[in-house]
Amino acid sequence: MGEIDTADVRQYLRGLAVFAGELPDFDPDAAPERPEELFLDWLTGAVEAGVREPHAMTLSTVGADGTPSARALLLKNVDRYGWQFAANAASPKGRDLAANPVAALSFYWPQQARQVRVTGPVEPESPENSAADFLARSPGSRAEALAGHQSRPLPDVRELERATELALERVEREPGLVVPEWTLYTVRAERVEFWQADKQRRHTRLCYERRGEEWTRGRLWP
């Protein structure tokens, strides 16, 4: 593809296909009482549809100065208690969560034109659960976490290569080693929205809201 003239970007974007192909049906009236049940149904549907990294999501946090930040990472678990992800507590996202323990998660599965939005307070899990999550990661992933320095300036890529090599050697020598700051977090969802696109823009939106231990649900305008 050739270069795009900046003056033509708007026209180029408007010409891109949107909601192409056959879209799945979604009947909110048949939705389960709890959002995690519907989420798992949509997640497995995304897997069957061939979506790459269907468990990838955007985590949005807010820093101590009020600046929002977003990044993609992987969902680790979901159950009636919430949606889980893991991070180093000393990383930018970990510092954000320490200052403002709330977050938003966004999932988008383009093959089905579906998205799910999850918002709520975030709680760190126990050191035991966090350690178990860390040890379940691949050796390379553990080495990357052990090398540290996430999001800091990298003046020379050779520093990364050397630090990773040393960290991997240590992981191999000490298979039970856990990064102390490694933390498993749970988003205790208070609001979960399911969005199904429609070619005519009559999108179907179903919103769950927590009321104590129970959930209410209702449709939203597109």
Image (tube, rainbow, N blue to C red):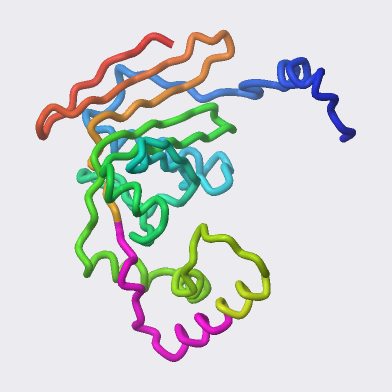
Corner quadrant of residue 211: top left
Q: Is residue 154 above or below residue 158?
A: above
Q: Is residue 92 above or below residue 145?
A: above
Q: Is residue 118 above or below residue 76?
A: above
Q: How many marks?
A: 0
Q: Position of residue 31 (x, y in %)?
A: 30, 25
**Residue 173 in magenta stretch:** yes
Instruction: Judge left or right: residue 120 versus residue 138.
Output: left
Q: Position of residue 155 (x, y in %)?
A: 65, 66
Give the position of the C terminus as an image quadrant. top left
Q: Nearer the viewer, residue 150 or 221?
A: 150
Q: Nearer the viewer, residue 222 or 121?
A: 121
The residue sitting at 29% across, 53% down in the picture is 185
Q: Position of residue 21 (x, y in %)?
A: 65, 24
The residue sitting at 33% across, 60% down in the picture is 89
The residue sitting at 32% across, 50% down in the picture is 84
Residue furthest out toward the front = 65
Q: Position of residue 209 (x, y in %)?
A: 22, 25
Give the position of the N terminus as an image quadrant. top right
Corner quadrant of residue 41: top left
In the image, the segment drawn in magenta is: 165-184
Instruction: Judge left or right: residue 201 versus residue 33.
Output: right
Residue furthest out toward the right = 2
Q: Is residue 87 above or below residue 51?
A: below
